[in-house]
Image (cartoon, helix red, strand yellow):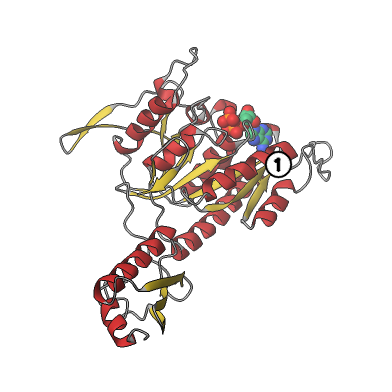
Amino acid sequence: MAYNKNDITKALETITAPGEGKSLIESGAVKNIVTFDKEIIVDVTIANPSLQAKKKIEVEIMKAIHQEIDVKADVKVNVTSDTKNEPFKPEKPKVPGIQNIIAIASGKGGVGKSTITSNMAVSLQKMGFKVGILDADVYGPSTHLMFDVANARPLSIEIDGRSKMQPIESYGVKILSLGFFTDANQAVIWRGAMASKALNQMIFDAHWGDLDFLLIDLPPGTGDIHLSIVQSVPVTGAVIVSTPQNIALADAKKGVAMFKQENINVPVLGIVENMSYFTPAELPNNKYYIFGKDGAKNLAEDIGTAFLGEVPLVQSIREAGDVGHPVALQDNTPLENAFAEITKNTLSQLVKRNTDLPPTEIVRITTMSGCSTK
Ligand SMILES: Nc1ncnc2c1ncn2[C@@H]1O[C@H](COP(=O)(O)OP(=O)(O)OP(=O)(O)O)[C@@H](O)[C@H]1O
């Protein structure tokens, strides 16, 4: 004989719908209950799309039915999420005072990740946002050079009886970089654990104050240090930088795949194409596609992520980086506008992400071969 649906409904009234403060029944999350012989099928729709939330609700339903109805019942739970009708509201930021953490990654080295990060930070600052950069490039931090503060050293200040590191401020952007703690003439090998400890201190033992955005300039690649960072901080979203060259695109693809891994699950906001083309001063109407044409645009389309914009290969971008005065500081030039455009596109993807998806979880690495969400 099949089980009684009213009894099952009562059992499910004891479970709270995630993020709603009401029972699964009261919130209308239970869409259907089917019983057949020893089998019970429950269809549930919740607002939180994370795998963790789905798994949790599935286990709670099974437990309630086994406890209240029959320990031998063959229970199947189908959990779907309904983010469109009922957007899941992001909770408070997990790093106090910091609203959004954006990781800038590339896969391949030298494609302009730090250049994009620096100029994006300046564009955000010019738009009126409070911005910080954490340069986590263990192989060659360069933000301190790009902001002309290579010789600065962060001071320690007392905040609420605790000693905190004061980020260095340049052009209205707060900066902490591994470069502040190493001698420019010495090759420092930051091993995973050491780098992770230094980064943790630069995030949690620093006095960032209130920030709308903390941009993290990641090292190239998809290794250890990236895992350390997602382990330490809830990264709101990642921006991938690539040139249109095939070899860079292949690495960018790996970068996207890393963030999308189920156990890392950091939303990719989109791809920026750097060094898209070159226009010589004497031929202002010509575009030379030195590294190939539209490669990153096509990649974004292929993998279903946003294309955030392109930056040409321009000598003054390199010079501005070298003298520590990012080109986005210029007023009303095509380069300033290019970075403003990329920044606006990133912001609109971020707003979309914060409306549609729950906050990113910090990832706890349990073994060398895999990670699990806290
Ligand atoms: N669009 C551009 N036009 C001209 N020069 C550029 C452009 N983008 C970056 N560069 C220059 O290319 C070099 C590498 O750029 P950058 O340091 O930003 O790359 P990266 O990806 O952060 O490198 P790394 O792998 O070392 O972290 C720098 O000298 C920079 O000034």
Residues 91 and 335: in front is 91
Q: What residue type is labelled 1?
A: Pro
Picture layout, residue 176 above or below residue 239: above
Picture layout, residue 4 above or below residue 95: below
Picture layout, residue 131 above or below residue 81: above
On the image, which quarter does residue 208 sit in? top left
Q: Residue furthest toward the top?
A: 185
Q: How many callouts does the rendering have?
A: 1
Label 1 Cα crowd, 10 Å radius (few <14 / some 14-19 / many 20+): some
Q: Which residue is drawn at 46% across and 23% down?
A: 150
Q: Where is residue 304 in the image (x, y as percent from the top left)?
A: 64, 58
Q: Position of residue 329 (x, y in %)?
A: 54, 40
Helix, strand or loop at disc 1? loop
118 vs 65, left or right, is right
Quadrant of ligand 1: it is top right
Residue with the mark numbered 1: 312
102 vs 327, left or right, is left
Q: Residue at x 54, y 53 (%)?
A: 269
Q: Residue furthest toward the front?
A: 1
Residue 310 in view: yes
Residues 155 and 272: in front is 272
Residues 191 and 216: in front is 191
Q: Does the residue labelled 1 lie within 8 Å of ligand 1?
A: yes
221 vs 358, left or right, is right
Q: Residue at x 48, y 50 (%)?
A: 266
Residue 245 in view: no
